[in-house]
Image (cartoon, rainbow, N blue to C red):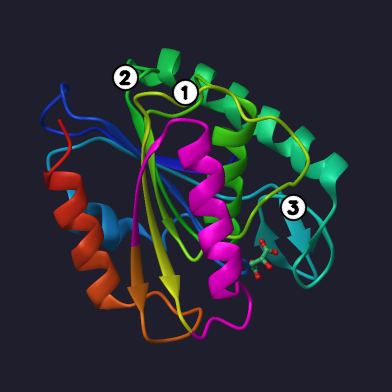
C-alpha cells in the first residue's frame, strides 16, 4: 500500500498508524500525529480503493452503506500490510495505535472488530459501526477513543453510542468525546484525543 513511514525518536513509543478520510491521502493526518506524540514513529497509509479518483480504504455501495465483502477483504489486506511494515521498518507490531478519520476511522474500527491482534488501540474521529451481526474478538486491554458529533449527518449519535457499546461489550476501554458539531474533525476533539493518549498506561 502507498504509505509514508517516519521513524520516531523513541522506539518504546507506539507507532501511530494514520488513516485518512474519503478523498484524502497519507499526508492529511501527519499534523495530528505531531500533536499526539512527536516522539513516536508514524506510518501513514493511503487507501487502495479509488472512488471516482477519491482514495478510500474499502468500497461502499452508497453513502454510509458499506460493501461488506470488500470491507472484510481490505481489513485483512491492511492487517497484512502492517505485519510486513513492522518487519521492514523494525517497529513493534504489537504496539500500534491507529488514528483514523471518517472512512479511515471505519477501517480502524473494522481492524478491531475482526482481528484481536491488529491494533493496541485506536483514536476514531467520527467512526460508524463498520459491520453488524458479528461477534467481536475479546478486546481486553485495548484502548479506544471515539470523537463523535451530536449533529453528524453521516454518523448519528445513536450509532456512535452503539459503537461504544459494541467495544465495551468486547471488554475494550472506551472513552467517547462529544462535539456539538457535525462530521468535521475539530481542533478541540484533537486536543481531547491528545489528553486521552497522555493518560494511557
Ligand atoms: C464511509 O464511507 O466510510 C463513511 O461514509 C464515511 C465517509 O464518507 O468516508
In three-dimensional space, the C-alpha distance between marks 1 and 3, rounded to whole angstroms, equals 19 Å
* Cα distance in 3D space between marks 3 and 2: 26 Å
Mark 1 lies on residue: 85
Residue occupied by mark 2:
91
Magenta-colored span? 151-176
Residue 161 lies within the magenta run = yes
Q: Residues within 10 Å of mark 3 (few under 14, many from 20)?
A: some
Give the residue at x 41% y 86%: 181
Left or right? Give the position of 47 relative to 84.
Answer: right
The residue that label 3 is drawn on is 49
- Mark closer to the chain start, 1 or 2: 1
Instruction: Tell me what residue is drawn at x 54 percent, y 81 percent.
Output: 152
Q: Position of residue 53 (x, y in %)?
A: 74, 68
Between 147 and 97, the one nearer to me in the picture:
147
Ligand 1's quadrant is bottom right
Q: Image quadrant for the C terminus? A: top left
Amino acid at each position: 500500500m502507498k504509505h509514508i513511514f517516519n521513524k520516531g525518536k523513541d522506539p518504546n513509543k507506539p507507532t501511530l498508524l494514520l488513516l485518512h478520510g474519503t478523498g484524502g491521502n497519507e499526508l492529511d493526518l501527519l499534523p495530528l500525529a505531531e500533536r499526539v506524540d512527536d516522539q513516536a514513529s508514524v506510518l501513514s497509509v493511503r487507501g487502495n480503493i479509488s472512488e471516482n479518483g477519491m482514495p478510500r480504504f474499502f468500497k461502499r455501495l452508497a453513502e454510509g452503506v458499506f460493501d461488506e465483502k470488500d470491507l472484510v477483504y481490505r481489513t485483512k489486506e491492511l492487517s497484512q500490510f502492517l505485519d510486513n511494515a513492522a518487519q521492514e521498518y523494525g517497529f513493534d507490531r504489537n504496539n500500534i495505535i491507529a488514528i483514523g478519520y471518517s472512512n479511515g476511522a471505519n477501517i480502524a474500527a473494522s481492524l478491531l472488530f475482526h482481528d484481536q491482534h491488529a491494533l493496541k488501540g485506536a483514536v476514531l474521529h467520527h467512526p460508524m459501526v463498520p459491520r453488524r451481526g458479528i461477534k467481536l474478538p475479546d478486546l481486553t486491554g485495548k484502548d479506544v477513543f471515539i470523537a463523535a458529533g451530536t449533529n453528524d449527518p453521516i454518523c448519528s449519535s445513536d450509532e456512535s453510542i452503539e459503537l461504544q457499546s459494541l467495544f465495551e461489550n468486547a471488554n475494550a476501554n472506551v472513552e467517547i468525546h462529544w462535539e456539538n458539531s457535525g462530521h468535521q474533525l475539530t481542533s478541540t476533539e484533537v486536543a481531547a484525543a491528545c489528553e486521552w493518549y497522555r493518560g494511557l498506561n
